Each structure stands twice: as C-alpha cells, then as structure tokens.
Amino acid sequence: MAKRVRLTDDVAKAATCPPGKKDVLIFDAALRGFALRVTAAGGRGFLLQYTVAGVRRRATIGEWGVLTTAQARAKAEALRGQVAEKRDPTAERKQRLAEQRAAEATAKAEQARAAFTVEALIEQWAALHLAERSASYGRRAPADLRASLRAWLVAPAASLDHAATVALLDHVRAERGPIAANRLRAMARACWTWATRRGSLPANPWAATPRPAAERARERVLSDAELADLWRISATLPHPWFGFLRLLILTGQRRGEVAALAWAELDLAAAEWRLPAVRAKNHRAHTVPLSPAALAVLAEVPRVAGQSLVFGNARGTPPSGFGRLTDRLEAAMQEAAAEAGRSCPPWTLHDLRRTVATGLQRLGVRLEVTEALLNHVSGSRSGIVGVYQRHGWEPEKRAALEAWAGHVLRCAEAMPQAEDGRVVALVERRERRA
C-alpha cells in the first residue's frame, strides 16, 4: 500500500526510491490523490491521481524544485475541482497539446506555402525537370512563363486558383492571340502537374481550364520561287542570321538546334554535324550530313576566339529575336513577290523544316530517310519498327541532302539576275553584308 504523509518541501527533499524499484509514490495525507513520484534516478515530480468514469488517471503537475510543494498542492486542488465537475484534466491537457501541435503545423504549412511562390515553382521546375528536356525548351519555357505570369511571381503558387488561371488565359488571348494563350496553358499545366506529383502543391488549377483555341496542324510550305527569294534575301543579312538561315534551309533541322550549334559538334573533314542527345528535342543523338553547300556557308561564318557557338552572340549565348527576323524576312519576301506578280502568305521559321521534308518527297526520297534526316521518332520510326529497325540511313541521308542542296541551287540560279549580271548562286561568297 502506498505511503501517506503530509507532503512538504522537507519530505520531498528527503524522499528516496527503495532499492530494486523504478519509482515510488508518496501520497499526501490531506489532499486525496495528490502525490510525489520519486524515481530510482532521483527525479521528483508531483501528480494527481483521480478516477473518471471508472478509469484511473494521473495528471502530471510538475517537478519539485521548479514548483514548491505548496504551489504543487494549489495546482492539485484546482485539478480536483475539475474532477468534481466531471471533467478529465488529463484528456483536456492532451486535447490542448494536440490543438497546439495542429496550430503549429498549420502555421508551418502556411509559411511554406507563402515561401513557395510562382517564381520558386518555375525555378524548381526548370532546374529539376527541364534539365531532361532540350536546351532550347529549357531556356524558353521558364522565360515565357515568367513573362506571362509576371504579376503572380511573388504570390504563393497555391494561391493561383482556377478562376485566376482562366482570367490569365483570357488576358493573354486578348493581348497576344489564341495561339499564345494555348502555349501558356500547355507550359503552365506541365509545370503545375510536375509540382502536384511531387507533393509541392495540392492541386493543378490549369488542369480543367478550357483550351483558348483549337489549333490545326500548319500546312505552309514555301514554293520554289519563295525559297529562291529567301535565299537571295539571306545574302543581305549580317552575322549570325546569314549562316543561321541558310543552314536551316539546307539541313531542315530545328531552329533551336541550329541556333545553338557548337563548333565542337562539327566534323568538317567528315562533312558531318553530330548533334548530341542532350541538345536534341527527342533526346536522341543525331548525325546531319553536310552538303558542299552547307560547308561553304560554314566557311563564311567568322570564328571568334573563345566563342564556342557557331552563331553565338557577344555574351556567348545562342541568338534570339527570331520573331523580328521573321518579320523582316516576310516583309522583304512579300515585296519581292509583289514585284513578280505573286503573293507570299505569312510563314514561320518552322515552316522551312516542312518545306525541306516536302521537297525531299518531291525528289523521290524515301519517307524513312526523310524522318531519319529530321530526327523524328514518330511515323515510320515509331512502335516496333523503332525498336528493331536500327539502320541509320547515313548514306541515304547524305544523298538526300545533296539532292536537296542541288534543288535549292537550281531555284536560286533560276532567279532574275542582279543589275551587274551576277546570279545569286548557292555557294556564292558575299561581297557585301548589311
């Protein structure tokens, strides 16, 4: 049976735990349930033992030394009053602690939510996810997102709700057109989906947004006359646009891949451009044969000491401003077409890739060779064929691009001659550069 004495500070100071036991309870003789617990390690703490609904419980009061016996007794009397009111001090204490922890967790989550801004989301998406994408998309997508979401960059990413995303898409559509809104929706959906799958965000507000506009696959292909006009106009362009544009025409490769072409990727002796997988849109290494015409274009590109990129700017980065370039070219081509009594519908740099593919088809090049040249993984190179058919078509690719260069040459030579009687030939050296 537990000892009962009048608990005082002297009693608490002198109390010890009997040998062989982990602890001992010394109950107060005056206040029912009030006790001092003494451990084998010398610890001394006050508690109140009570019964609620037939269940015995103990409520911790505090350590002796922090509390005097009198202070502990007063707290015990208050707890006994709660028990008399049929309350459970221990359960209430646990409830208070649980509520405190929940409040702290909510505050911590809110702090994390506030810190995870739209800017932080885009930065993480670019660093952790887009590193697996092509270099051009990895640069362009974050920049485009930041530009479109400029007003939201410092806001918590989780605060961007469905209504806000719809309003943003409506604004972009009104300001820049439905295609720009479609691009924003696609990039933002991808970015937010990545974050929700990582658990960084609870939901993706872009997921259920309506598509601003239905898009049809582009069908624009430059005619031979337009191709000849473009080749002539390219001769008036300064570095890097002259070489950049002519390589687009001669190789049919993607704009970003040509723009970021590095000297190290070129084997001029073997007449090859070896595009590494890390730079290819589909992450597949790709070899592009260089026709004599392409080699002649590269021979005219100035090599700058310390510059690793063929078309790099003064900062050592790929050129930008493709929209302004296209506008300039389109205006010049429309003027040339008008003088010849033709029309020249709008076109984009990507249409040159389609023009090359269509031109190769007209020249009788096999579809498999064209797709290998364009580094496509769909169409004839998808599915089981893509897995088991490993022929690289290298000789056929070289023959195809040389045939295409010959076609471009014939188009260029068929143009009206310049005032001095010269024909703007395929591999001409430019005597004047704008």
Image: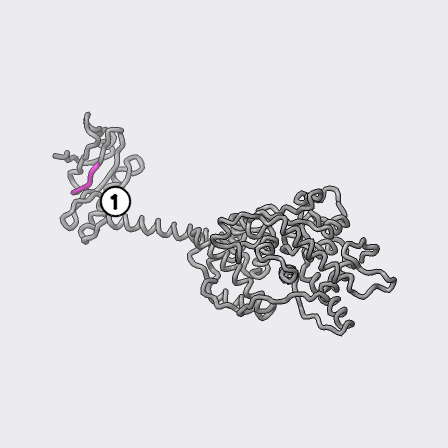
Secondary structure at badge 1 equals helix
Farthest residue to the bottom: give it. Answer: 341
Give residue 407's quadrant in the image: bottom right
Q: How is the image coloured?
A: one colour
Amino acid type of the residue that numbered disc 1 sits on in the rendered structure? Lys
- Quadrant placement of the C terminus: bottom right
Residue 242: x %, y % from top left: 74, 56
Q: Is residue 280 magenta?
A: no
Farthest residue to the right: give it. Answer: 420
Residue 305 visible in the displayed image:
yes
Farthest residue to the top: give it. Answer: 19
- Quadrant placement of the N terminus: top left
Q: Residue at x 60, y 67 (%)?
A: 219
Q: Horizontally, is 125 left or right of 76 in the view?
A: right
Q: From the viewer's perspective, is residue 269 above or below residue 134?
A: above
Residue underneath mark 1: 75
Q: Determine the main secondary structure of the stretch shown in magenta.
A: strand
Q: Residue at x 78, y 72 (%)?
A: 339
Residue 146 visible in the displayed image:
no
Residue range highlighted in magenta? 32-36
Residue 11: x %, y % from top left: 22, 32
